[in-house]
Amino acid sequence: MTKPWTVGVEQEFLLVDPETRRPVPLADSVAQHAGAGHDVQRELTPFQIEVATPVCATAEELAEQVLGGRVHLAKAAHAAGCRLLASAIPPIGTLGPPPGTDDRRYRMMEHSHRAIIGGQGVCGMHVHVGVPDRDVAVRVSNALRPWLPTLLALSVNSPIEQAEDTGYASWRTIVWSRWPISGPPPHLGSAAEYDRLVGALESTEVLLDTGMVYWDVRPSAQHPTVEVRVADIPMTAREAVVIAEIIRAFARTAAESGEPERVDDVMLRAAYWRAARDGVDGLAVDPRTGNLVPARDRAAELVSWCADALEDASALSTVEDHLAWLGAHGSGAARQRRAFGGSPDARGLVDLVLAETVDDAR
């Protein structure tokens, strides 16, 4: 049984050709080379691969597992003739439909959701936090709603698509929002209410199954955990760990606090859009007030609110140091843009991200 306040992280990556830097459908080969040492899973398309950490109790263990999973997959990708890329969308080339796929689920989704599925091989990071029960998971979800844009802003890492600047820091968020059940979850009263709503959505055939509940926070159906899936895959392991530790600390703080305030759904969507466009380097909408504030101030407020839990997890100094580092170096999206520099082929950008995917030297 999952213990409260433990954490696990799923990281999704692109597989790219070492010469063209374009996505290549080699997930089966990479998974075979990865062997049984890590929890490696195939994703929606064969251009992607995922690795999950085990359940981690300490910040030190999480950091070791997040980086270790990346290094292991990178070696497997190299053996399979491709490279592992921690970008939430391909900077060069497109994913397109899998070549000759006979995957039944993919074909069912293609039949039911049609053109939406095209180009949906984007990469995120999913953080699972152990909680006392599923009702607490729903309370954490409610409390997280106004802060989801801030978590997104901290993670943005997908500004370039097909060697062109999209103008967004997280183009993945815009692409992913095409799914009918995605983005911020509704404010719900209990796990039972969540289950009733999901059951009703299944009956409408908007969902093929519960696996298509793509809200950015959701309680697990099998375990006492809450899953937060708002983030782009961060460029570096360190960024992934910082975001996961903030989420874990927030969950614990929210569970031990009073009933969370409601925020307006329309204002929350506006905050999402602004976070996807500008990330942590711009202004943010505070969905509680509708005011524009520096996104870094929102991030600092978030960390301050759960600072005690971060301190208990021995993660506060790491998180604070990272926020200072972001101020000097910018988000993943900002660093991608600097490397891109308007280049017609974006190869230099891809090479930067390839190196940063497994480099945790700073």
Image: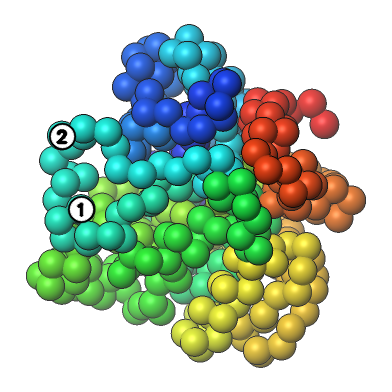
Number of the label disc, if any, that sits on residue 110? 1
**Residue 282 falls in which quadrant of the image?**
bottom right
Identified by mark 2, the residue type is Asp
Q: Earlier in the sequence, mark 1 or mark 2?
A: 2
**Residue 212 falls in which quadrant of the image?**
bottom left
Assign the N terminus to one quadrant of the image: top left
According to the picture, the residue beneath numbered tag 2 turns out to be: 102
Number of the label disc, if any, that sits on residue 69? none
Assign the C terminus to one quadrant of the image: top right
Asked if residue 57 shows in the view, the reply is: no
Label 2: few (<14), some or many (≥20) within 10 Å? few
Q: Where residue 219 appears, x then y in whole percent?
A: 35, 59
Label 1: few (<14), some or many (≥20) within 10 Å? some
Residue 2 or 89: which is nearer the viewer?
89
Q: Where residue 172 appears, x then y in whole percent?
A: 51, 56
Q: Where residue 88 appears, x then y in whole percent?
A: 54, 46
Asked if disc 1 and disc 2 are in contact, CB closer than 8 Å, the reply is no
Picture residue at 47% right of the left edge, 14% below the top: 81
Asked if residue 102 shows in the view, the reply is: yes
Picture residue at 32% right of the left edge, 22% below the top: 28
Picture residue at 36% right of the left edge, 44% below the top: 96
Q: Secondary structure at mark 1?
A: helix
Residue 13 or 226: which is nearer the viewer?
13
Q: Residue furthest left?
A: 203
**Residue 48 falls in which quadrant of the image?**
top left
- Left or right: 335, with 40 as reference point: right
Picture residue at 77% right of the left edge, 79% below the top: 293
Identified by mark 1, the residue type is Glu
